[in-house]
Image (cartoon, rainbow, N blue to C red):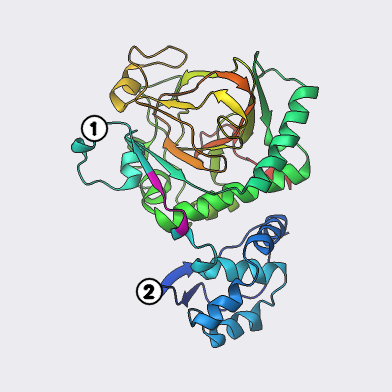
């Protein structure tokens, strides 16, 4: 069930290190709250006391929160989402990789650059080492003991919704973590790529089957963030995603486009320590526009990214990219591509992980 503790306001004004910021309260399924509570207990113990001692969090503000949300699982997670410093995202700033000459930038928003296929965002430390190792161990065990129609030599593809409940819950918590970070730091992603408007269709990636078509407009929505779209079941997902891909020797994924508004790709293993070779190759907007799915672009990729495990890569659906073959070891990634749901969304692609509850 959902956390249904009383809400004092829709928004809290809480002091931060630099300024008092507006942070919306976030609701989530209880199992996700439990997952986040356990994670925060490990990495944020004593943080409330530090904030009180430094004056960054006033006692009266804490008392207001405690009055309405006792610091059990639900209240603790709400408090952490309300106080941005609890996550201290400034410690792991967003990184940007440009797929075209930076001299050609024309002052657009990040959402617009993503839609144009010109940038890949990197969000470090979305998943900690303990979480990565736990998911990798589970995925490798399942991949070694089973197979499905999506497997090819050197690559196993596991649909998260088909896995054990604890894996589903963990992956859902991770995806919501990414969405919260994007909603907080880069709201233009939601505004430009997901919020329905008269321009919405022209901003969507072209269909793989009919590149000249424009996606039908979603129904008018009252939501204002990626998390709210997710919780309301208003996202369309790529087939059998979210998924965990397990690559072994010579395993890779050929050049392709995801054809949905946004892709989140999170490596769960590290190059060198866990595998050699590998990585994700990205082509420039020009080369992407000239390439078709399954065909090797005529030009080499603009870059090959091999970020540390736990880093989320964020990019748009018109970017041609590929999984570089692994030379040795095992490369494991969590991936999810999604757009705003429309009346034309296939019924089997609108549930994501929500149907697992």
C-alpha separation, residue under disc 2 versus residue under disc 1:
35 Å
Q: Height in image: 337 above or below 15? A: above
Residue 347 bears which disc, if any?
none
Q: Nearer the viewer, residue 320 or 129?
A: 129
Name the image quarter holding the N terminus. Answer: bottom right
Q: Residues within 10 Å of mark 1 (few under 14, many from 20)?
A: few
Looking at the rendered structure, the secondary structure element under dot 1 is loop
* Dot 2 crowding, Cα within 10 Å, few <14, some 14–19, many 20+: few
Q: Position of residue 227 (x, y in %)?
A: 54, 53
- Circle 1 residue: 101
One can see residue 340 in this view: no
Answer with the quarter of the image where residue 163 lies.
top right
Left or right of 196 in this view: 46: right
- Identify the residue at horizontal 61%, vertical 35% (top origin): 269
- Secondary structure found at label 2: loop
Q: Position of residue 96 (x, y in %)?
A: 36, 42
Q: Which residues are magenta?
A: 91-95
Residue picked out by circle 2: 19
Residue nearest the viewer, comparing 52 with 75: 52
Left or right, 40 with reference to 259 = right
> Among all residues in the image, which is located at the extreme bottom?
60
Camera sees residue 37: yes
Instruction: Name the spot of residue 64 as percent of width and height, x first.
Output: 59, 84
Magenta span includes 98: no
Find residue 50 and report its image quarter.
bottom right
Residue at point 44%, 51% (across, down): 220
């Amino acid at each position: 069930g959902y956390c249904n503790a009383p809400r004092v306001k829709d928004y809290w004004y809480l002091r931060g290190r630099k300024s008092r910021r507006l942070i919306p309260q976030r609701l989530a399924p209880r199992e996700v709250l439990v997952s986040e509570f356990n994670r925060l207990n490990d990495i944020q113990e004593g943080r409330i006391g530090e904030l009180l001692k430094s004056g960054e969090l006033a006692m009266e503000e804490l008392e207001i929160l405690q009055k309405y949300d006792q610091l059990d699982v639900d209240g603790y997670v709400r408090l952490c989402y309300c106080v941005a410093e609890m996550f201290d995202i400034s410690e792991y700033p967003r990184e940007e990789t440009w797929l075209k000459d930076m001299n050609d930038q024309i002052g657009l928003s990040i959402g617009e650059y993503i839609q144009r296929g010109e940038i890949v965002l990197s969000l470090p430390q979305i998943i900690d080492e303990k979480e990565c190792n736990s998911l990798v161990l589970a995925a490798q065990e399942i991949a070694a003991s089973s197979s499905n129609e999506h497997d090819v030599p050197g690559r196993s593809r596991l649909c998260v919704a088909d896995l054990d409940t604890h894996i589903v819950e963990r992956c859902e918590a991770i995806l919501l973590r990414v969405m919260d970070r994007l909603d907080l730091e880069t709201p233009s992603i939601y505004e430009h790529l997901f919020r329905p408007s008269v321009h919405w269709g022209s901003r969507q990636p072209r269909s793989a089957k009919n590149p000249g078509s424009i996606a039908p407009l979603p129904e008018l929505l009252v939501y204002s963030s990626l998390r709210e779209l997710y919780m309301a079941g208003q996202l369309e997902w790529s087939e059998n995603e979210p998924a965990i891909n397990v690559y072994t020797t010579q395993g890779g994924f050929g050049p392709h486009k995801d054809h949905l508004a946004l892709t989140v790709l999170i490596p769960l293993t590290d190059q060198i320590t866990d595998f050699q070779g590998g990585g994700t190759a990205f082509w420039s907007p020009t080369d992407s526009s000239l390439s078709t799915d399954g065909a090797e672009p005529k030009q080499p990729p603009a870059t090959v990214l091999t970020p540390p495990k736990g880093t989320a890569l964020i990019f748009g659906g018109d970017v041609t990219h590929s999984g570089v073959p692994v030379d040795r070891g095992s490369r494991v990634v969590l991936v999810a591509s999604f757009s705003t749901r429309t009346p034309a969304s296939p019924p089997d692609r609108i549930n994501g992980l929500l149907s697992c509850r």
